[in-house]
Image: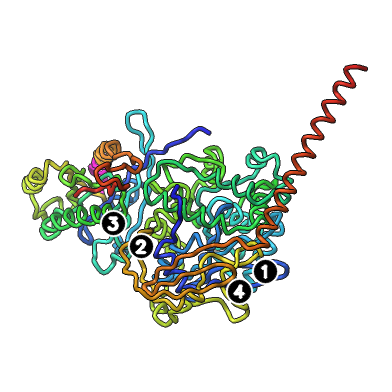
Amino acid sequence: MKGVFSAPGDYIHFKSQVPLHKIPIGTKQWRYYDFGPKAVPPLICLPGTAGTADVYYKQIMSLSMKGYRVISVDIPRVWNHTEWIQVFEKFLDAIDVHHIHLYGTSLGGFLAQLFALHRPRRVRSLVLSNTFLETRSFSAAMPWAPIASWTPSFLLKRYVLTGIRDGPHEPFIADSVDFVVSQVETLSREDLASRLSLTTADASVGPLLLSDSAITIMDVCHLILNLFTSCAFLKDQLSERYPEARRAYLKTGGDFPFLSRPDEVNLHLQLHLRRVGVEARPDLVHNIPKDGLGGSSGKEKNGDDTDKSRKDGEGTSGNPSTEREIPHSPESTGSNNLDNQPLESEECCHLNHQVALYVFPSGLTKEKHFVPTETRVHFMWEYAVLFYLLRYISSLYIIDNYSLEFRQVM
Amino acid sequence: MPSRRRTLLKVIILGDSGVGKTSLMNQYVNKKFSNQYKATIGADFLTKEVQFEDRLFTLQIWDTAGQERFQSLGVAFYRGADCCVLVYDVNSMKSFENLNNWRDEFLIQACLLNLRLRWQASPSDPENFPFVVIGNKIDIDGGNSRVVSEKKARAWCASKGNIPYFETSAKECVNVEEAFQCIAKDALKSGEEEELYLPDTIDVGNSSQQRSTGCEC
């Protein structure tokens, strides 16, 4: 893993071009990107446990340019599967979308299947990647799941990150891992806890009304399967459940092929959409304003994408309000090397929410993070909770030991 | 947790429009043939499980658009190919003459993808990359309308490094199975020779970390 993560050039370009929408629906805050011609039925991307709406930025950029509408969402803080179905349906109503095509990876794939099971009229097709049919094996692997909502965020992050395989990777796979790790860092304790709860809460996907021919299973062949993809047994279960589903195998790509092999994933997504009858409208791409390619309906309020940490339930990395002023040039996929960009002498410094953002006119942004006082207090509080939690567990152990000795004496 | 590896063999079918690429693929995978012509738009693929030397493989066969105006999906699917099948119509001299262009196009594009995307397993040695040539539609008019002789086709294959050659009829299912068995065998050989990815190496001379770019062509 690299010591310092610098955002890829194409991601910086993406942030400057695509608005992040934030809308409150009921008690839930939704963060999502909606890009591409409104006339086209959307492909909705659902990330996994470690993902955010941003992880599909390569799909959003590529497919929208080809005339498809792509919506990428952050899984909101929902704590059970019934709530997920209700909340997601409300979200679709709010953005005025009726028939959808779902692309889900890992946990996102499971949630996509659940939604297709309970709301069959709305889901026209599924693309499933590294996903599963039931949560039983995950709850067995995570006996401490019931106290996930009480667990400090650094422990949750550590747990999630240990699920991501590190080691000698191809450069592009290493870049994809780095990007996902950087996204995990933006997730709050509640975000992580709710996702782990969804992964471990007892549930399984029953037979779908959706025809197998409307399902594509996209998998990486040489993937060593683990908690955050799914074990071999679960993969076999998926294949057995949808025997006539289209199988789109990728040779390599690691845990996050949508980031490491975007051209191949995008190709398979295009083929899937074409097969299920989604007509791309490249003719409408030209009519879309540069600064916000076919956003959502006027119903919702677009929150300003400020550089607040997502600790408060919003926020994202980067500051598009600042970025939008900079003429960015798209870079080659996954290229993190910004060394070749000429730096102009003039630098303007912009301070926002305790983040010093140095903006170079050539399009290079650097961030210097200061730890705000409230964050320090937050960390101290977490450590205190952890300390007392450990003391409580050890005291239980001591009491248990004493009672055992007492019984033996008796 | 035990790791499971599925061996994927990726095959690309190239050739002029109307030579029977889609028909060959459908005949091999689905045992079906249709007389109705429908141009392939962009590309499409079918998968078939094949057994070879007591091992199971997934053959992913990519059917491509022969007409330039239908090549809307680019060449992303070229990457990671283990074998390339060049198809021509024995009743069309032009389709045979264009085999050169298709072969060169494939090697150029596959190598460009390697260099740009630092991917390890594609034609890093273009001269030895496995191709198979198929002369299709031998059934038409009982072979009387044929314009490309077998001798001429074999001579071209020999000049390009002894490329295996098959004459087929997708309609009558003649030699299709045999051709694809050879394709699978060549793809398997190519797949097993793929370089393994090695982590970043340190060049002591420059004392800087370098990443392998894979394709050296």
Q: Which one is nearer the viewer's eye here, A304 or A37? A: A304
Q: Kindly identify which chain the residue marked by label 1 belongs to.
A: A
Q: Do callouts 1 and 3 mark residues in contact (Cβ within 8 Å)? A: no
Cα distance in 3D space between marks 4 and 3? 39 Å
Q: What residue is disc 2 on? A: A338
Task: Give the label, 3 or 2, closer to the camera.
Answer: 2
Residue B147: give x, y in percent of width and height.
8, 55
Q: Which one is nearer the viewer's eye here, B71 or A59? A: A59
Q: Is residue A119 left or right of residue B51?
A: right
Amino acid carrying mark 1 in the image = Lys
Cα distance in 3D space between marks 1 and 4? 9 Å
Q: What residue is disc 3 on? A: B116
Cα distance in 3D space between marks 1 and 2? 42 Å
Amino acid carrying mark 2 in the image = Leu
Q: Kindly identify which chain the residue marked by label 2 belongs to.
A: A
Q: Please tell me whether mark 3 sits on a helix, a strand or a loop.
A: helix
Range shown magenta: B171-180
Do the residues at discs 4 and 2 belong to one chain? yes
Residue A265: give x, y in percent of width and height.
41, 56
- Answer whether residue B81 is visible to the viewer in this image: yes
Q: Do callouts 4 and 2 mark residues in contact (Cβ within 8 Å)? A: no
Which of the labelled discs sits on residue A95, or is there none? 4
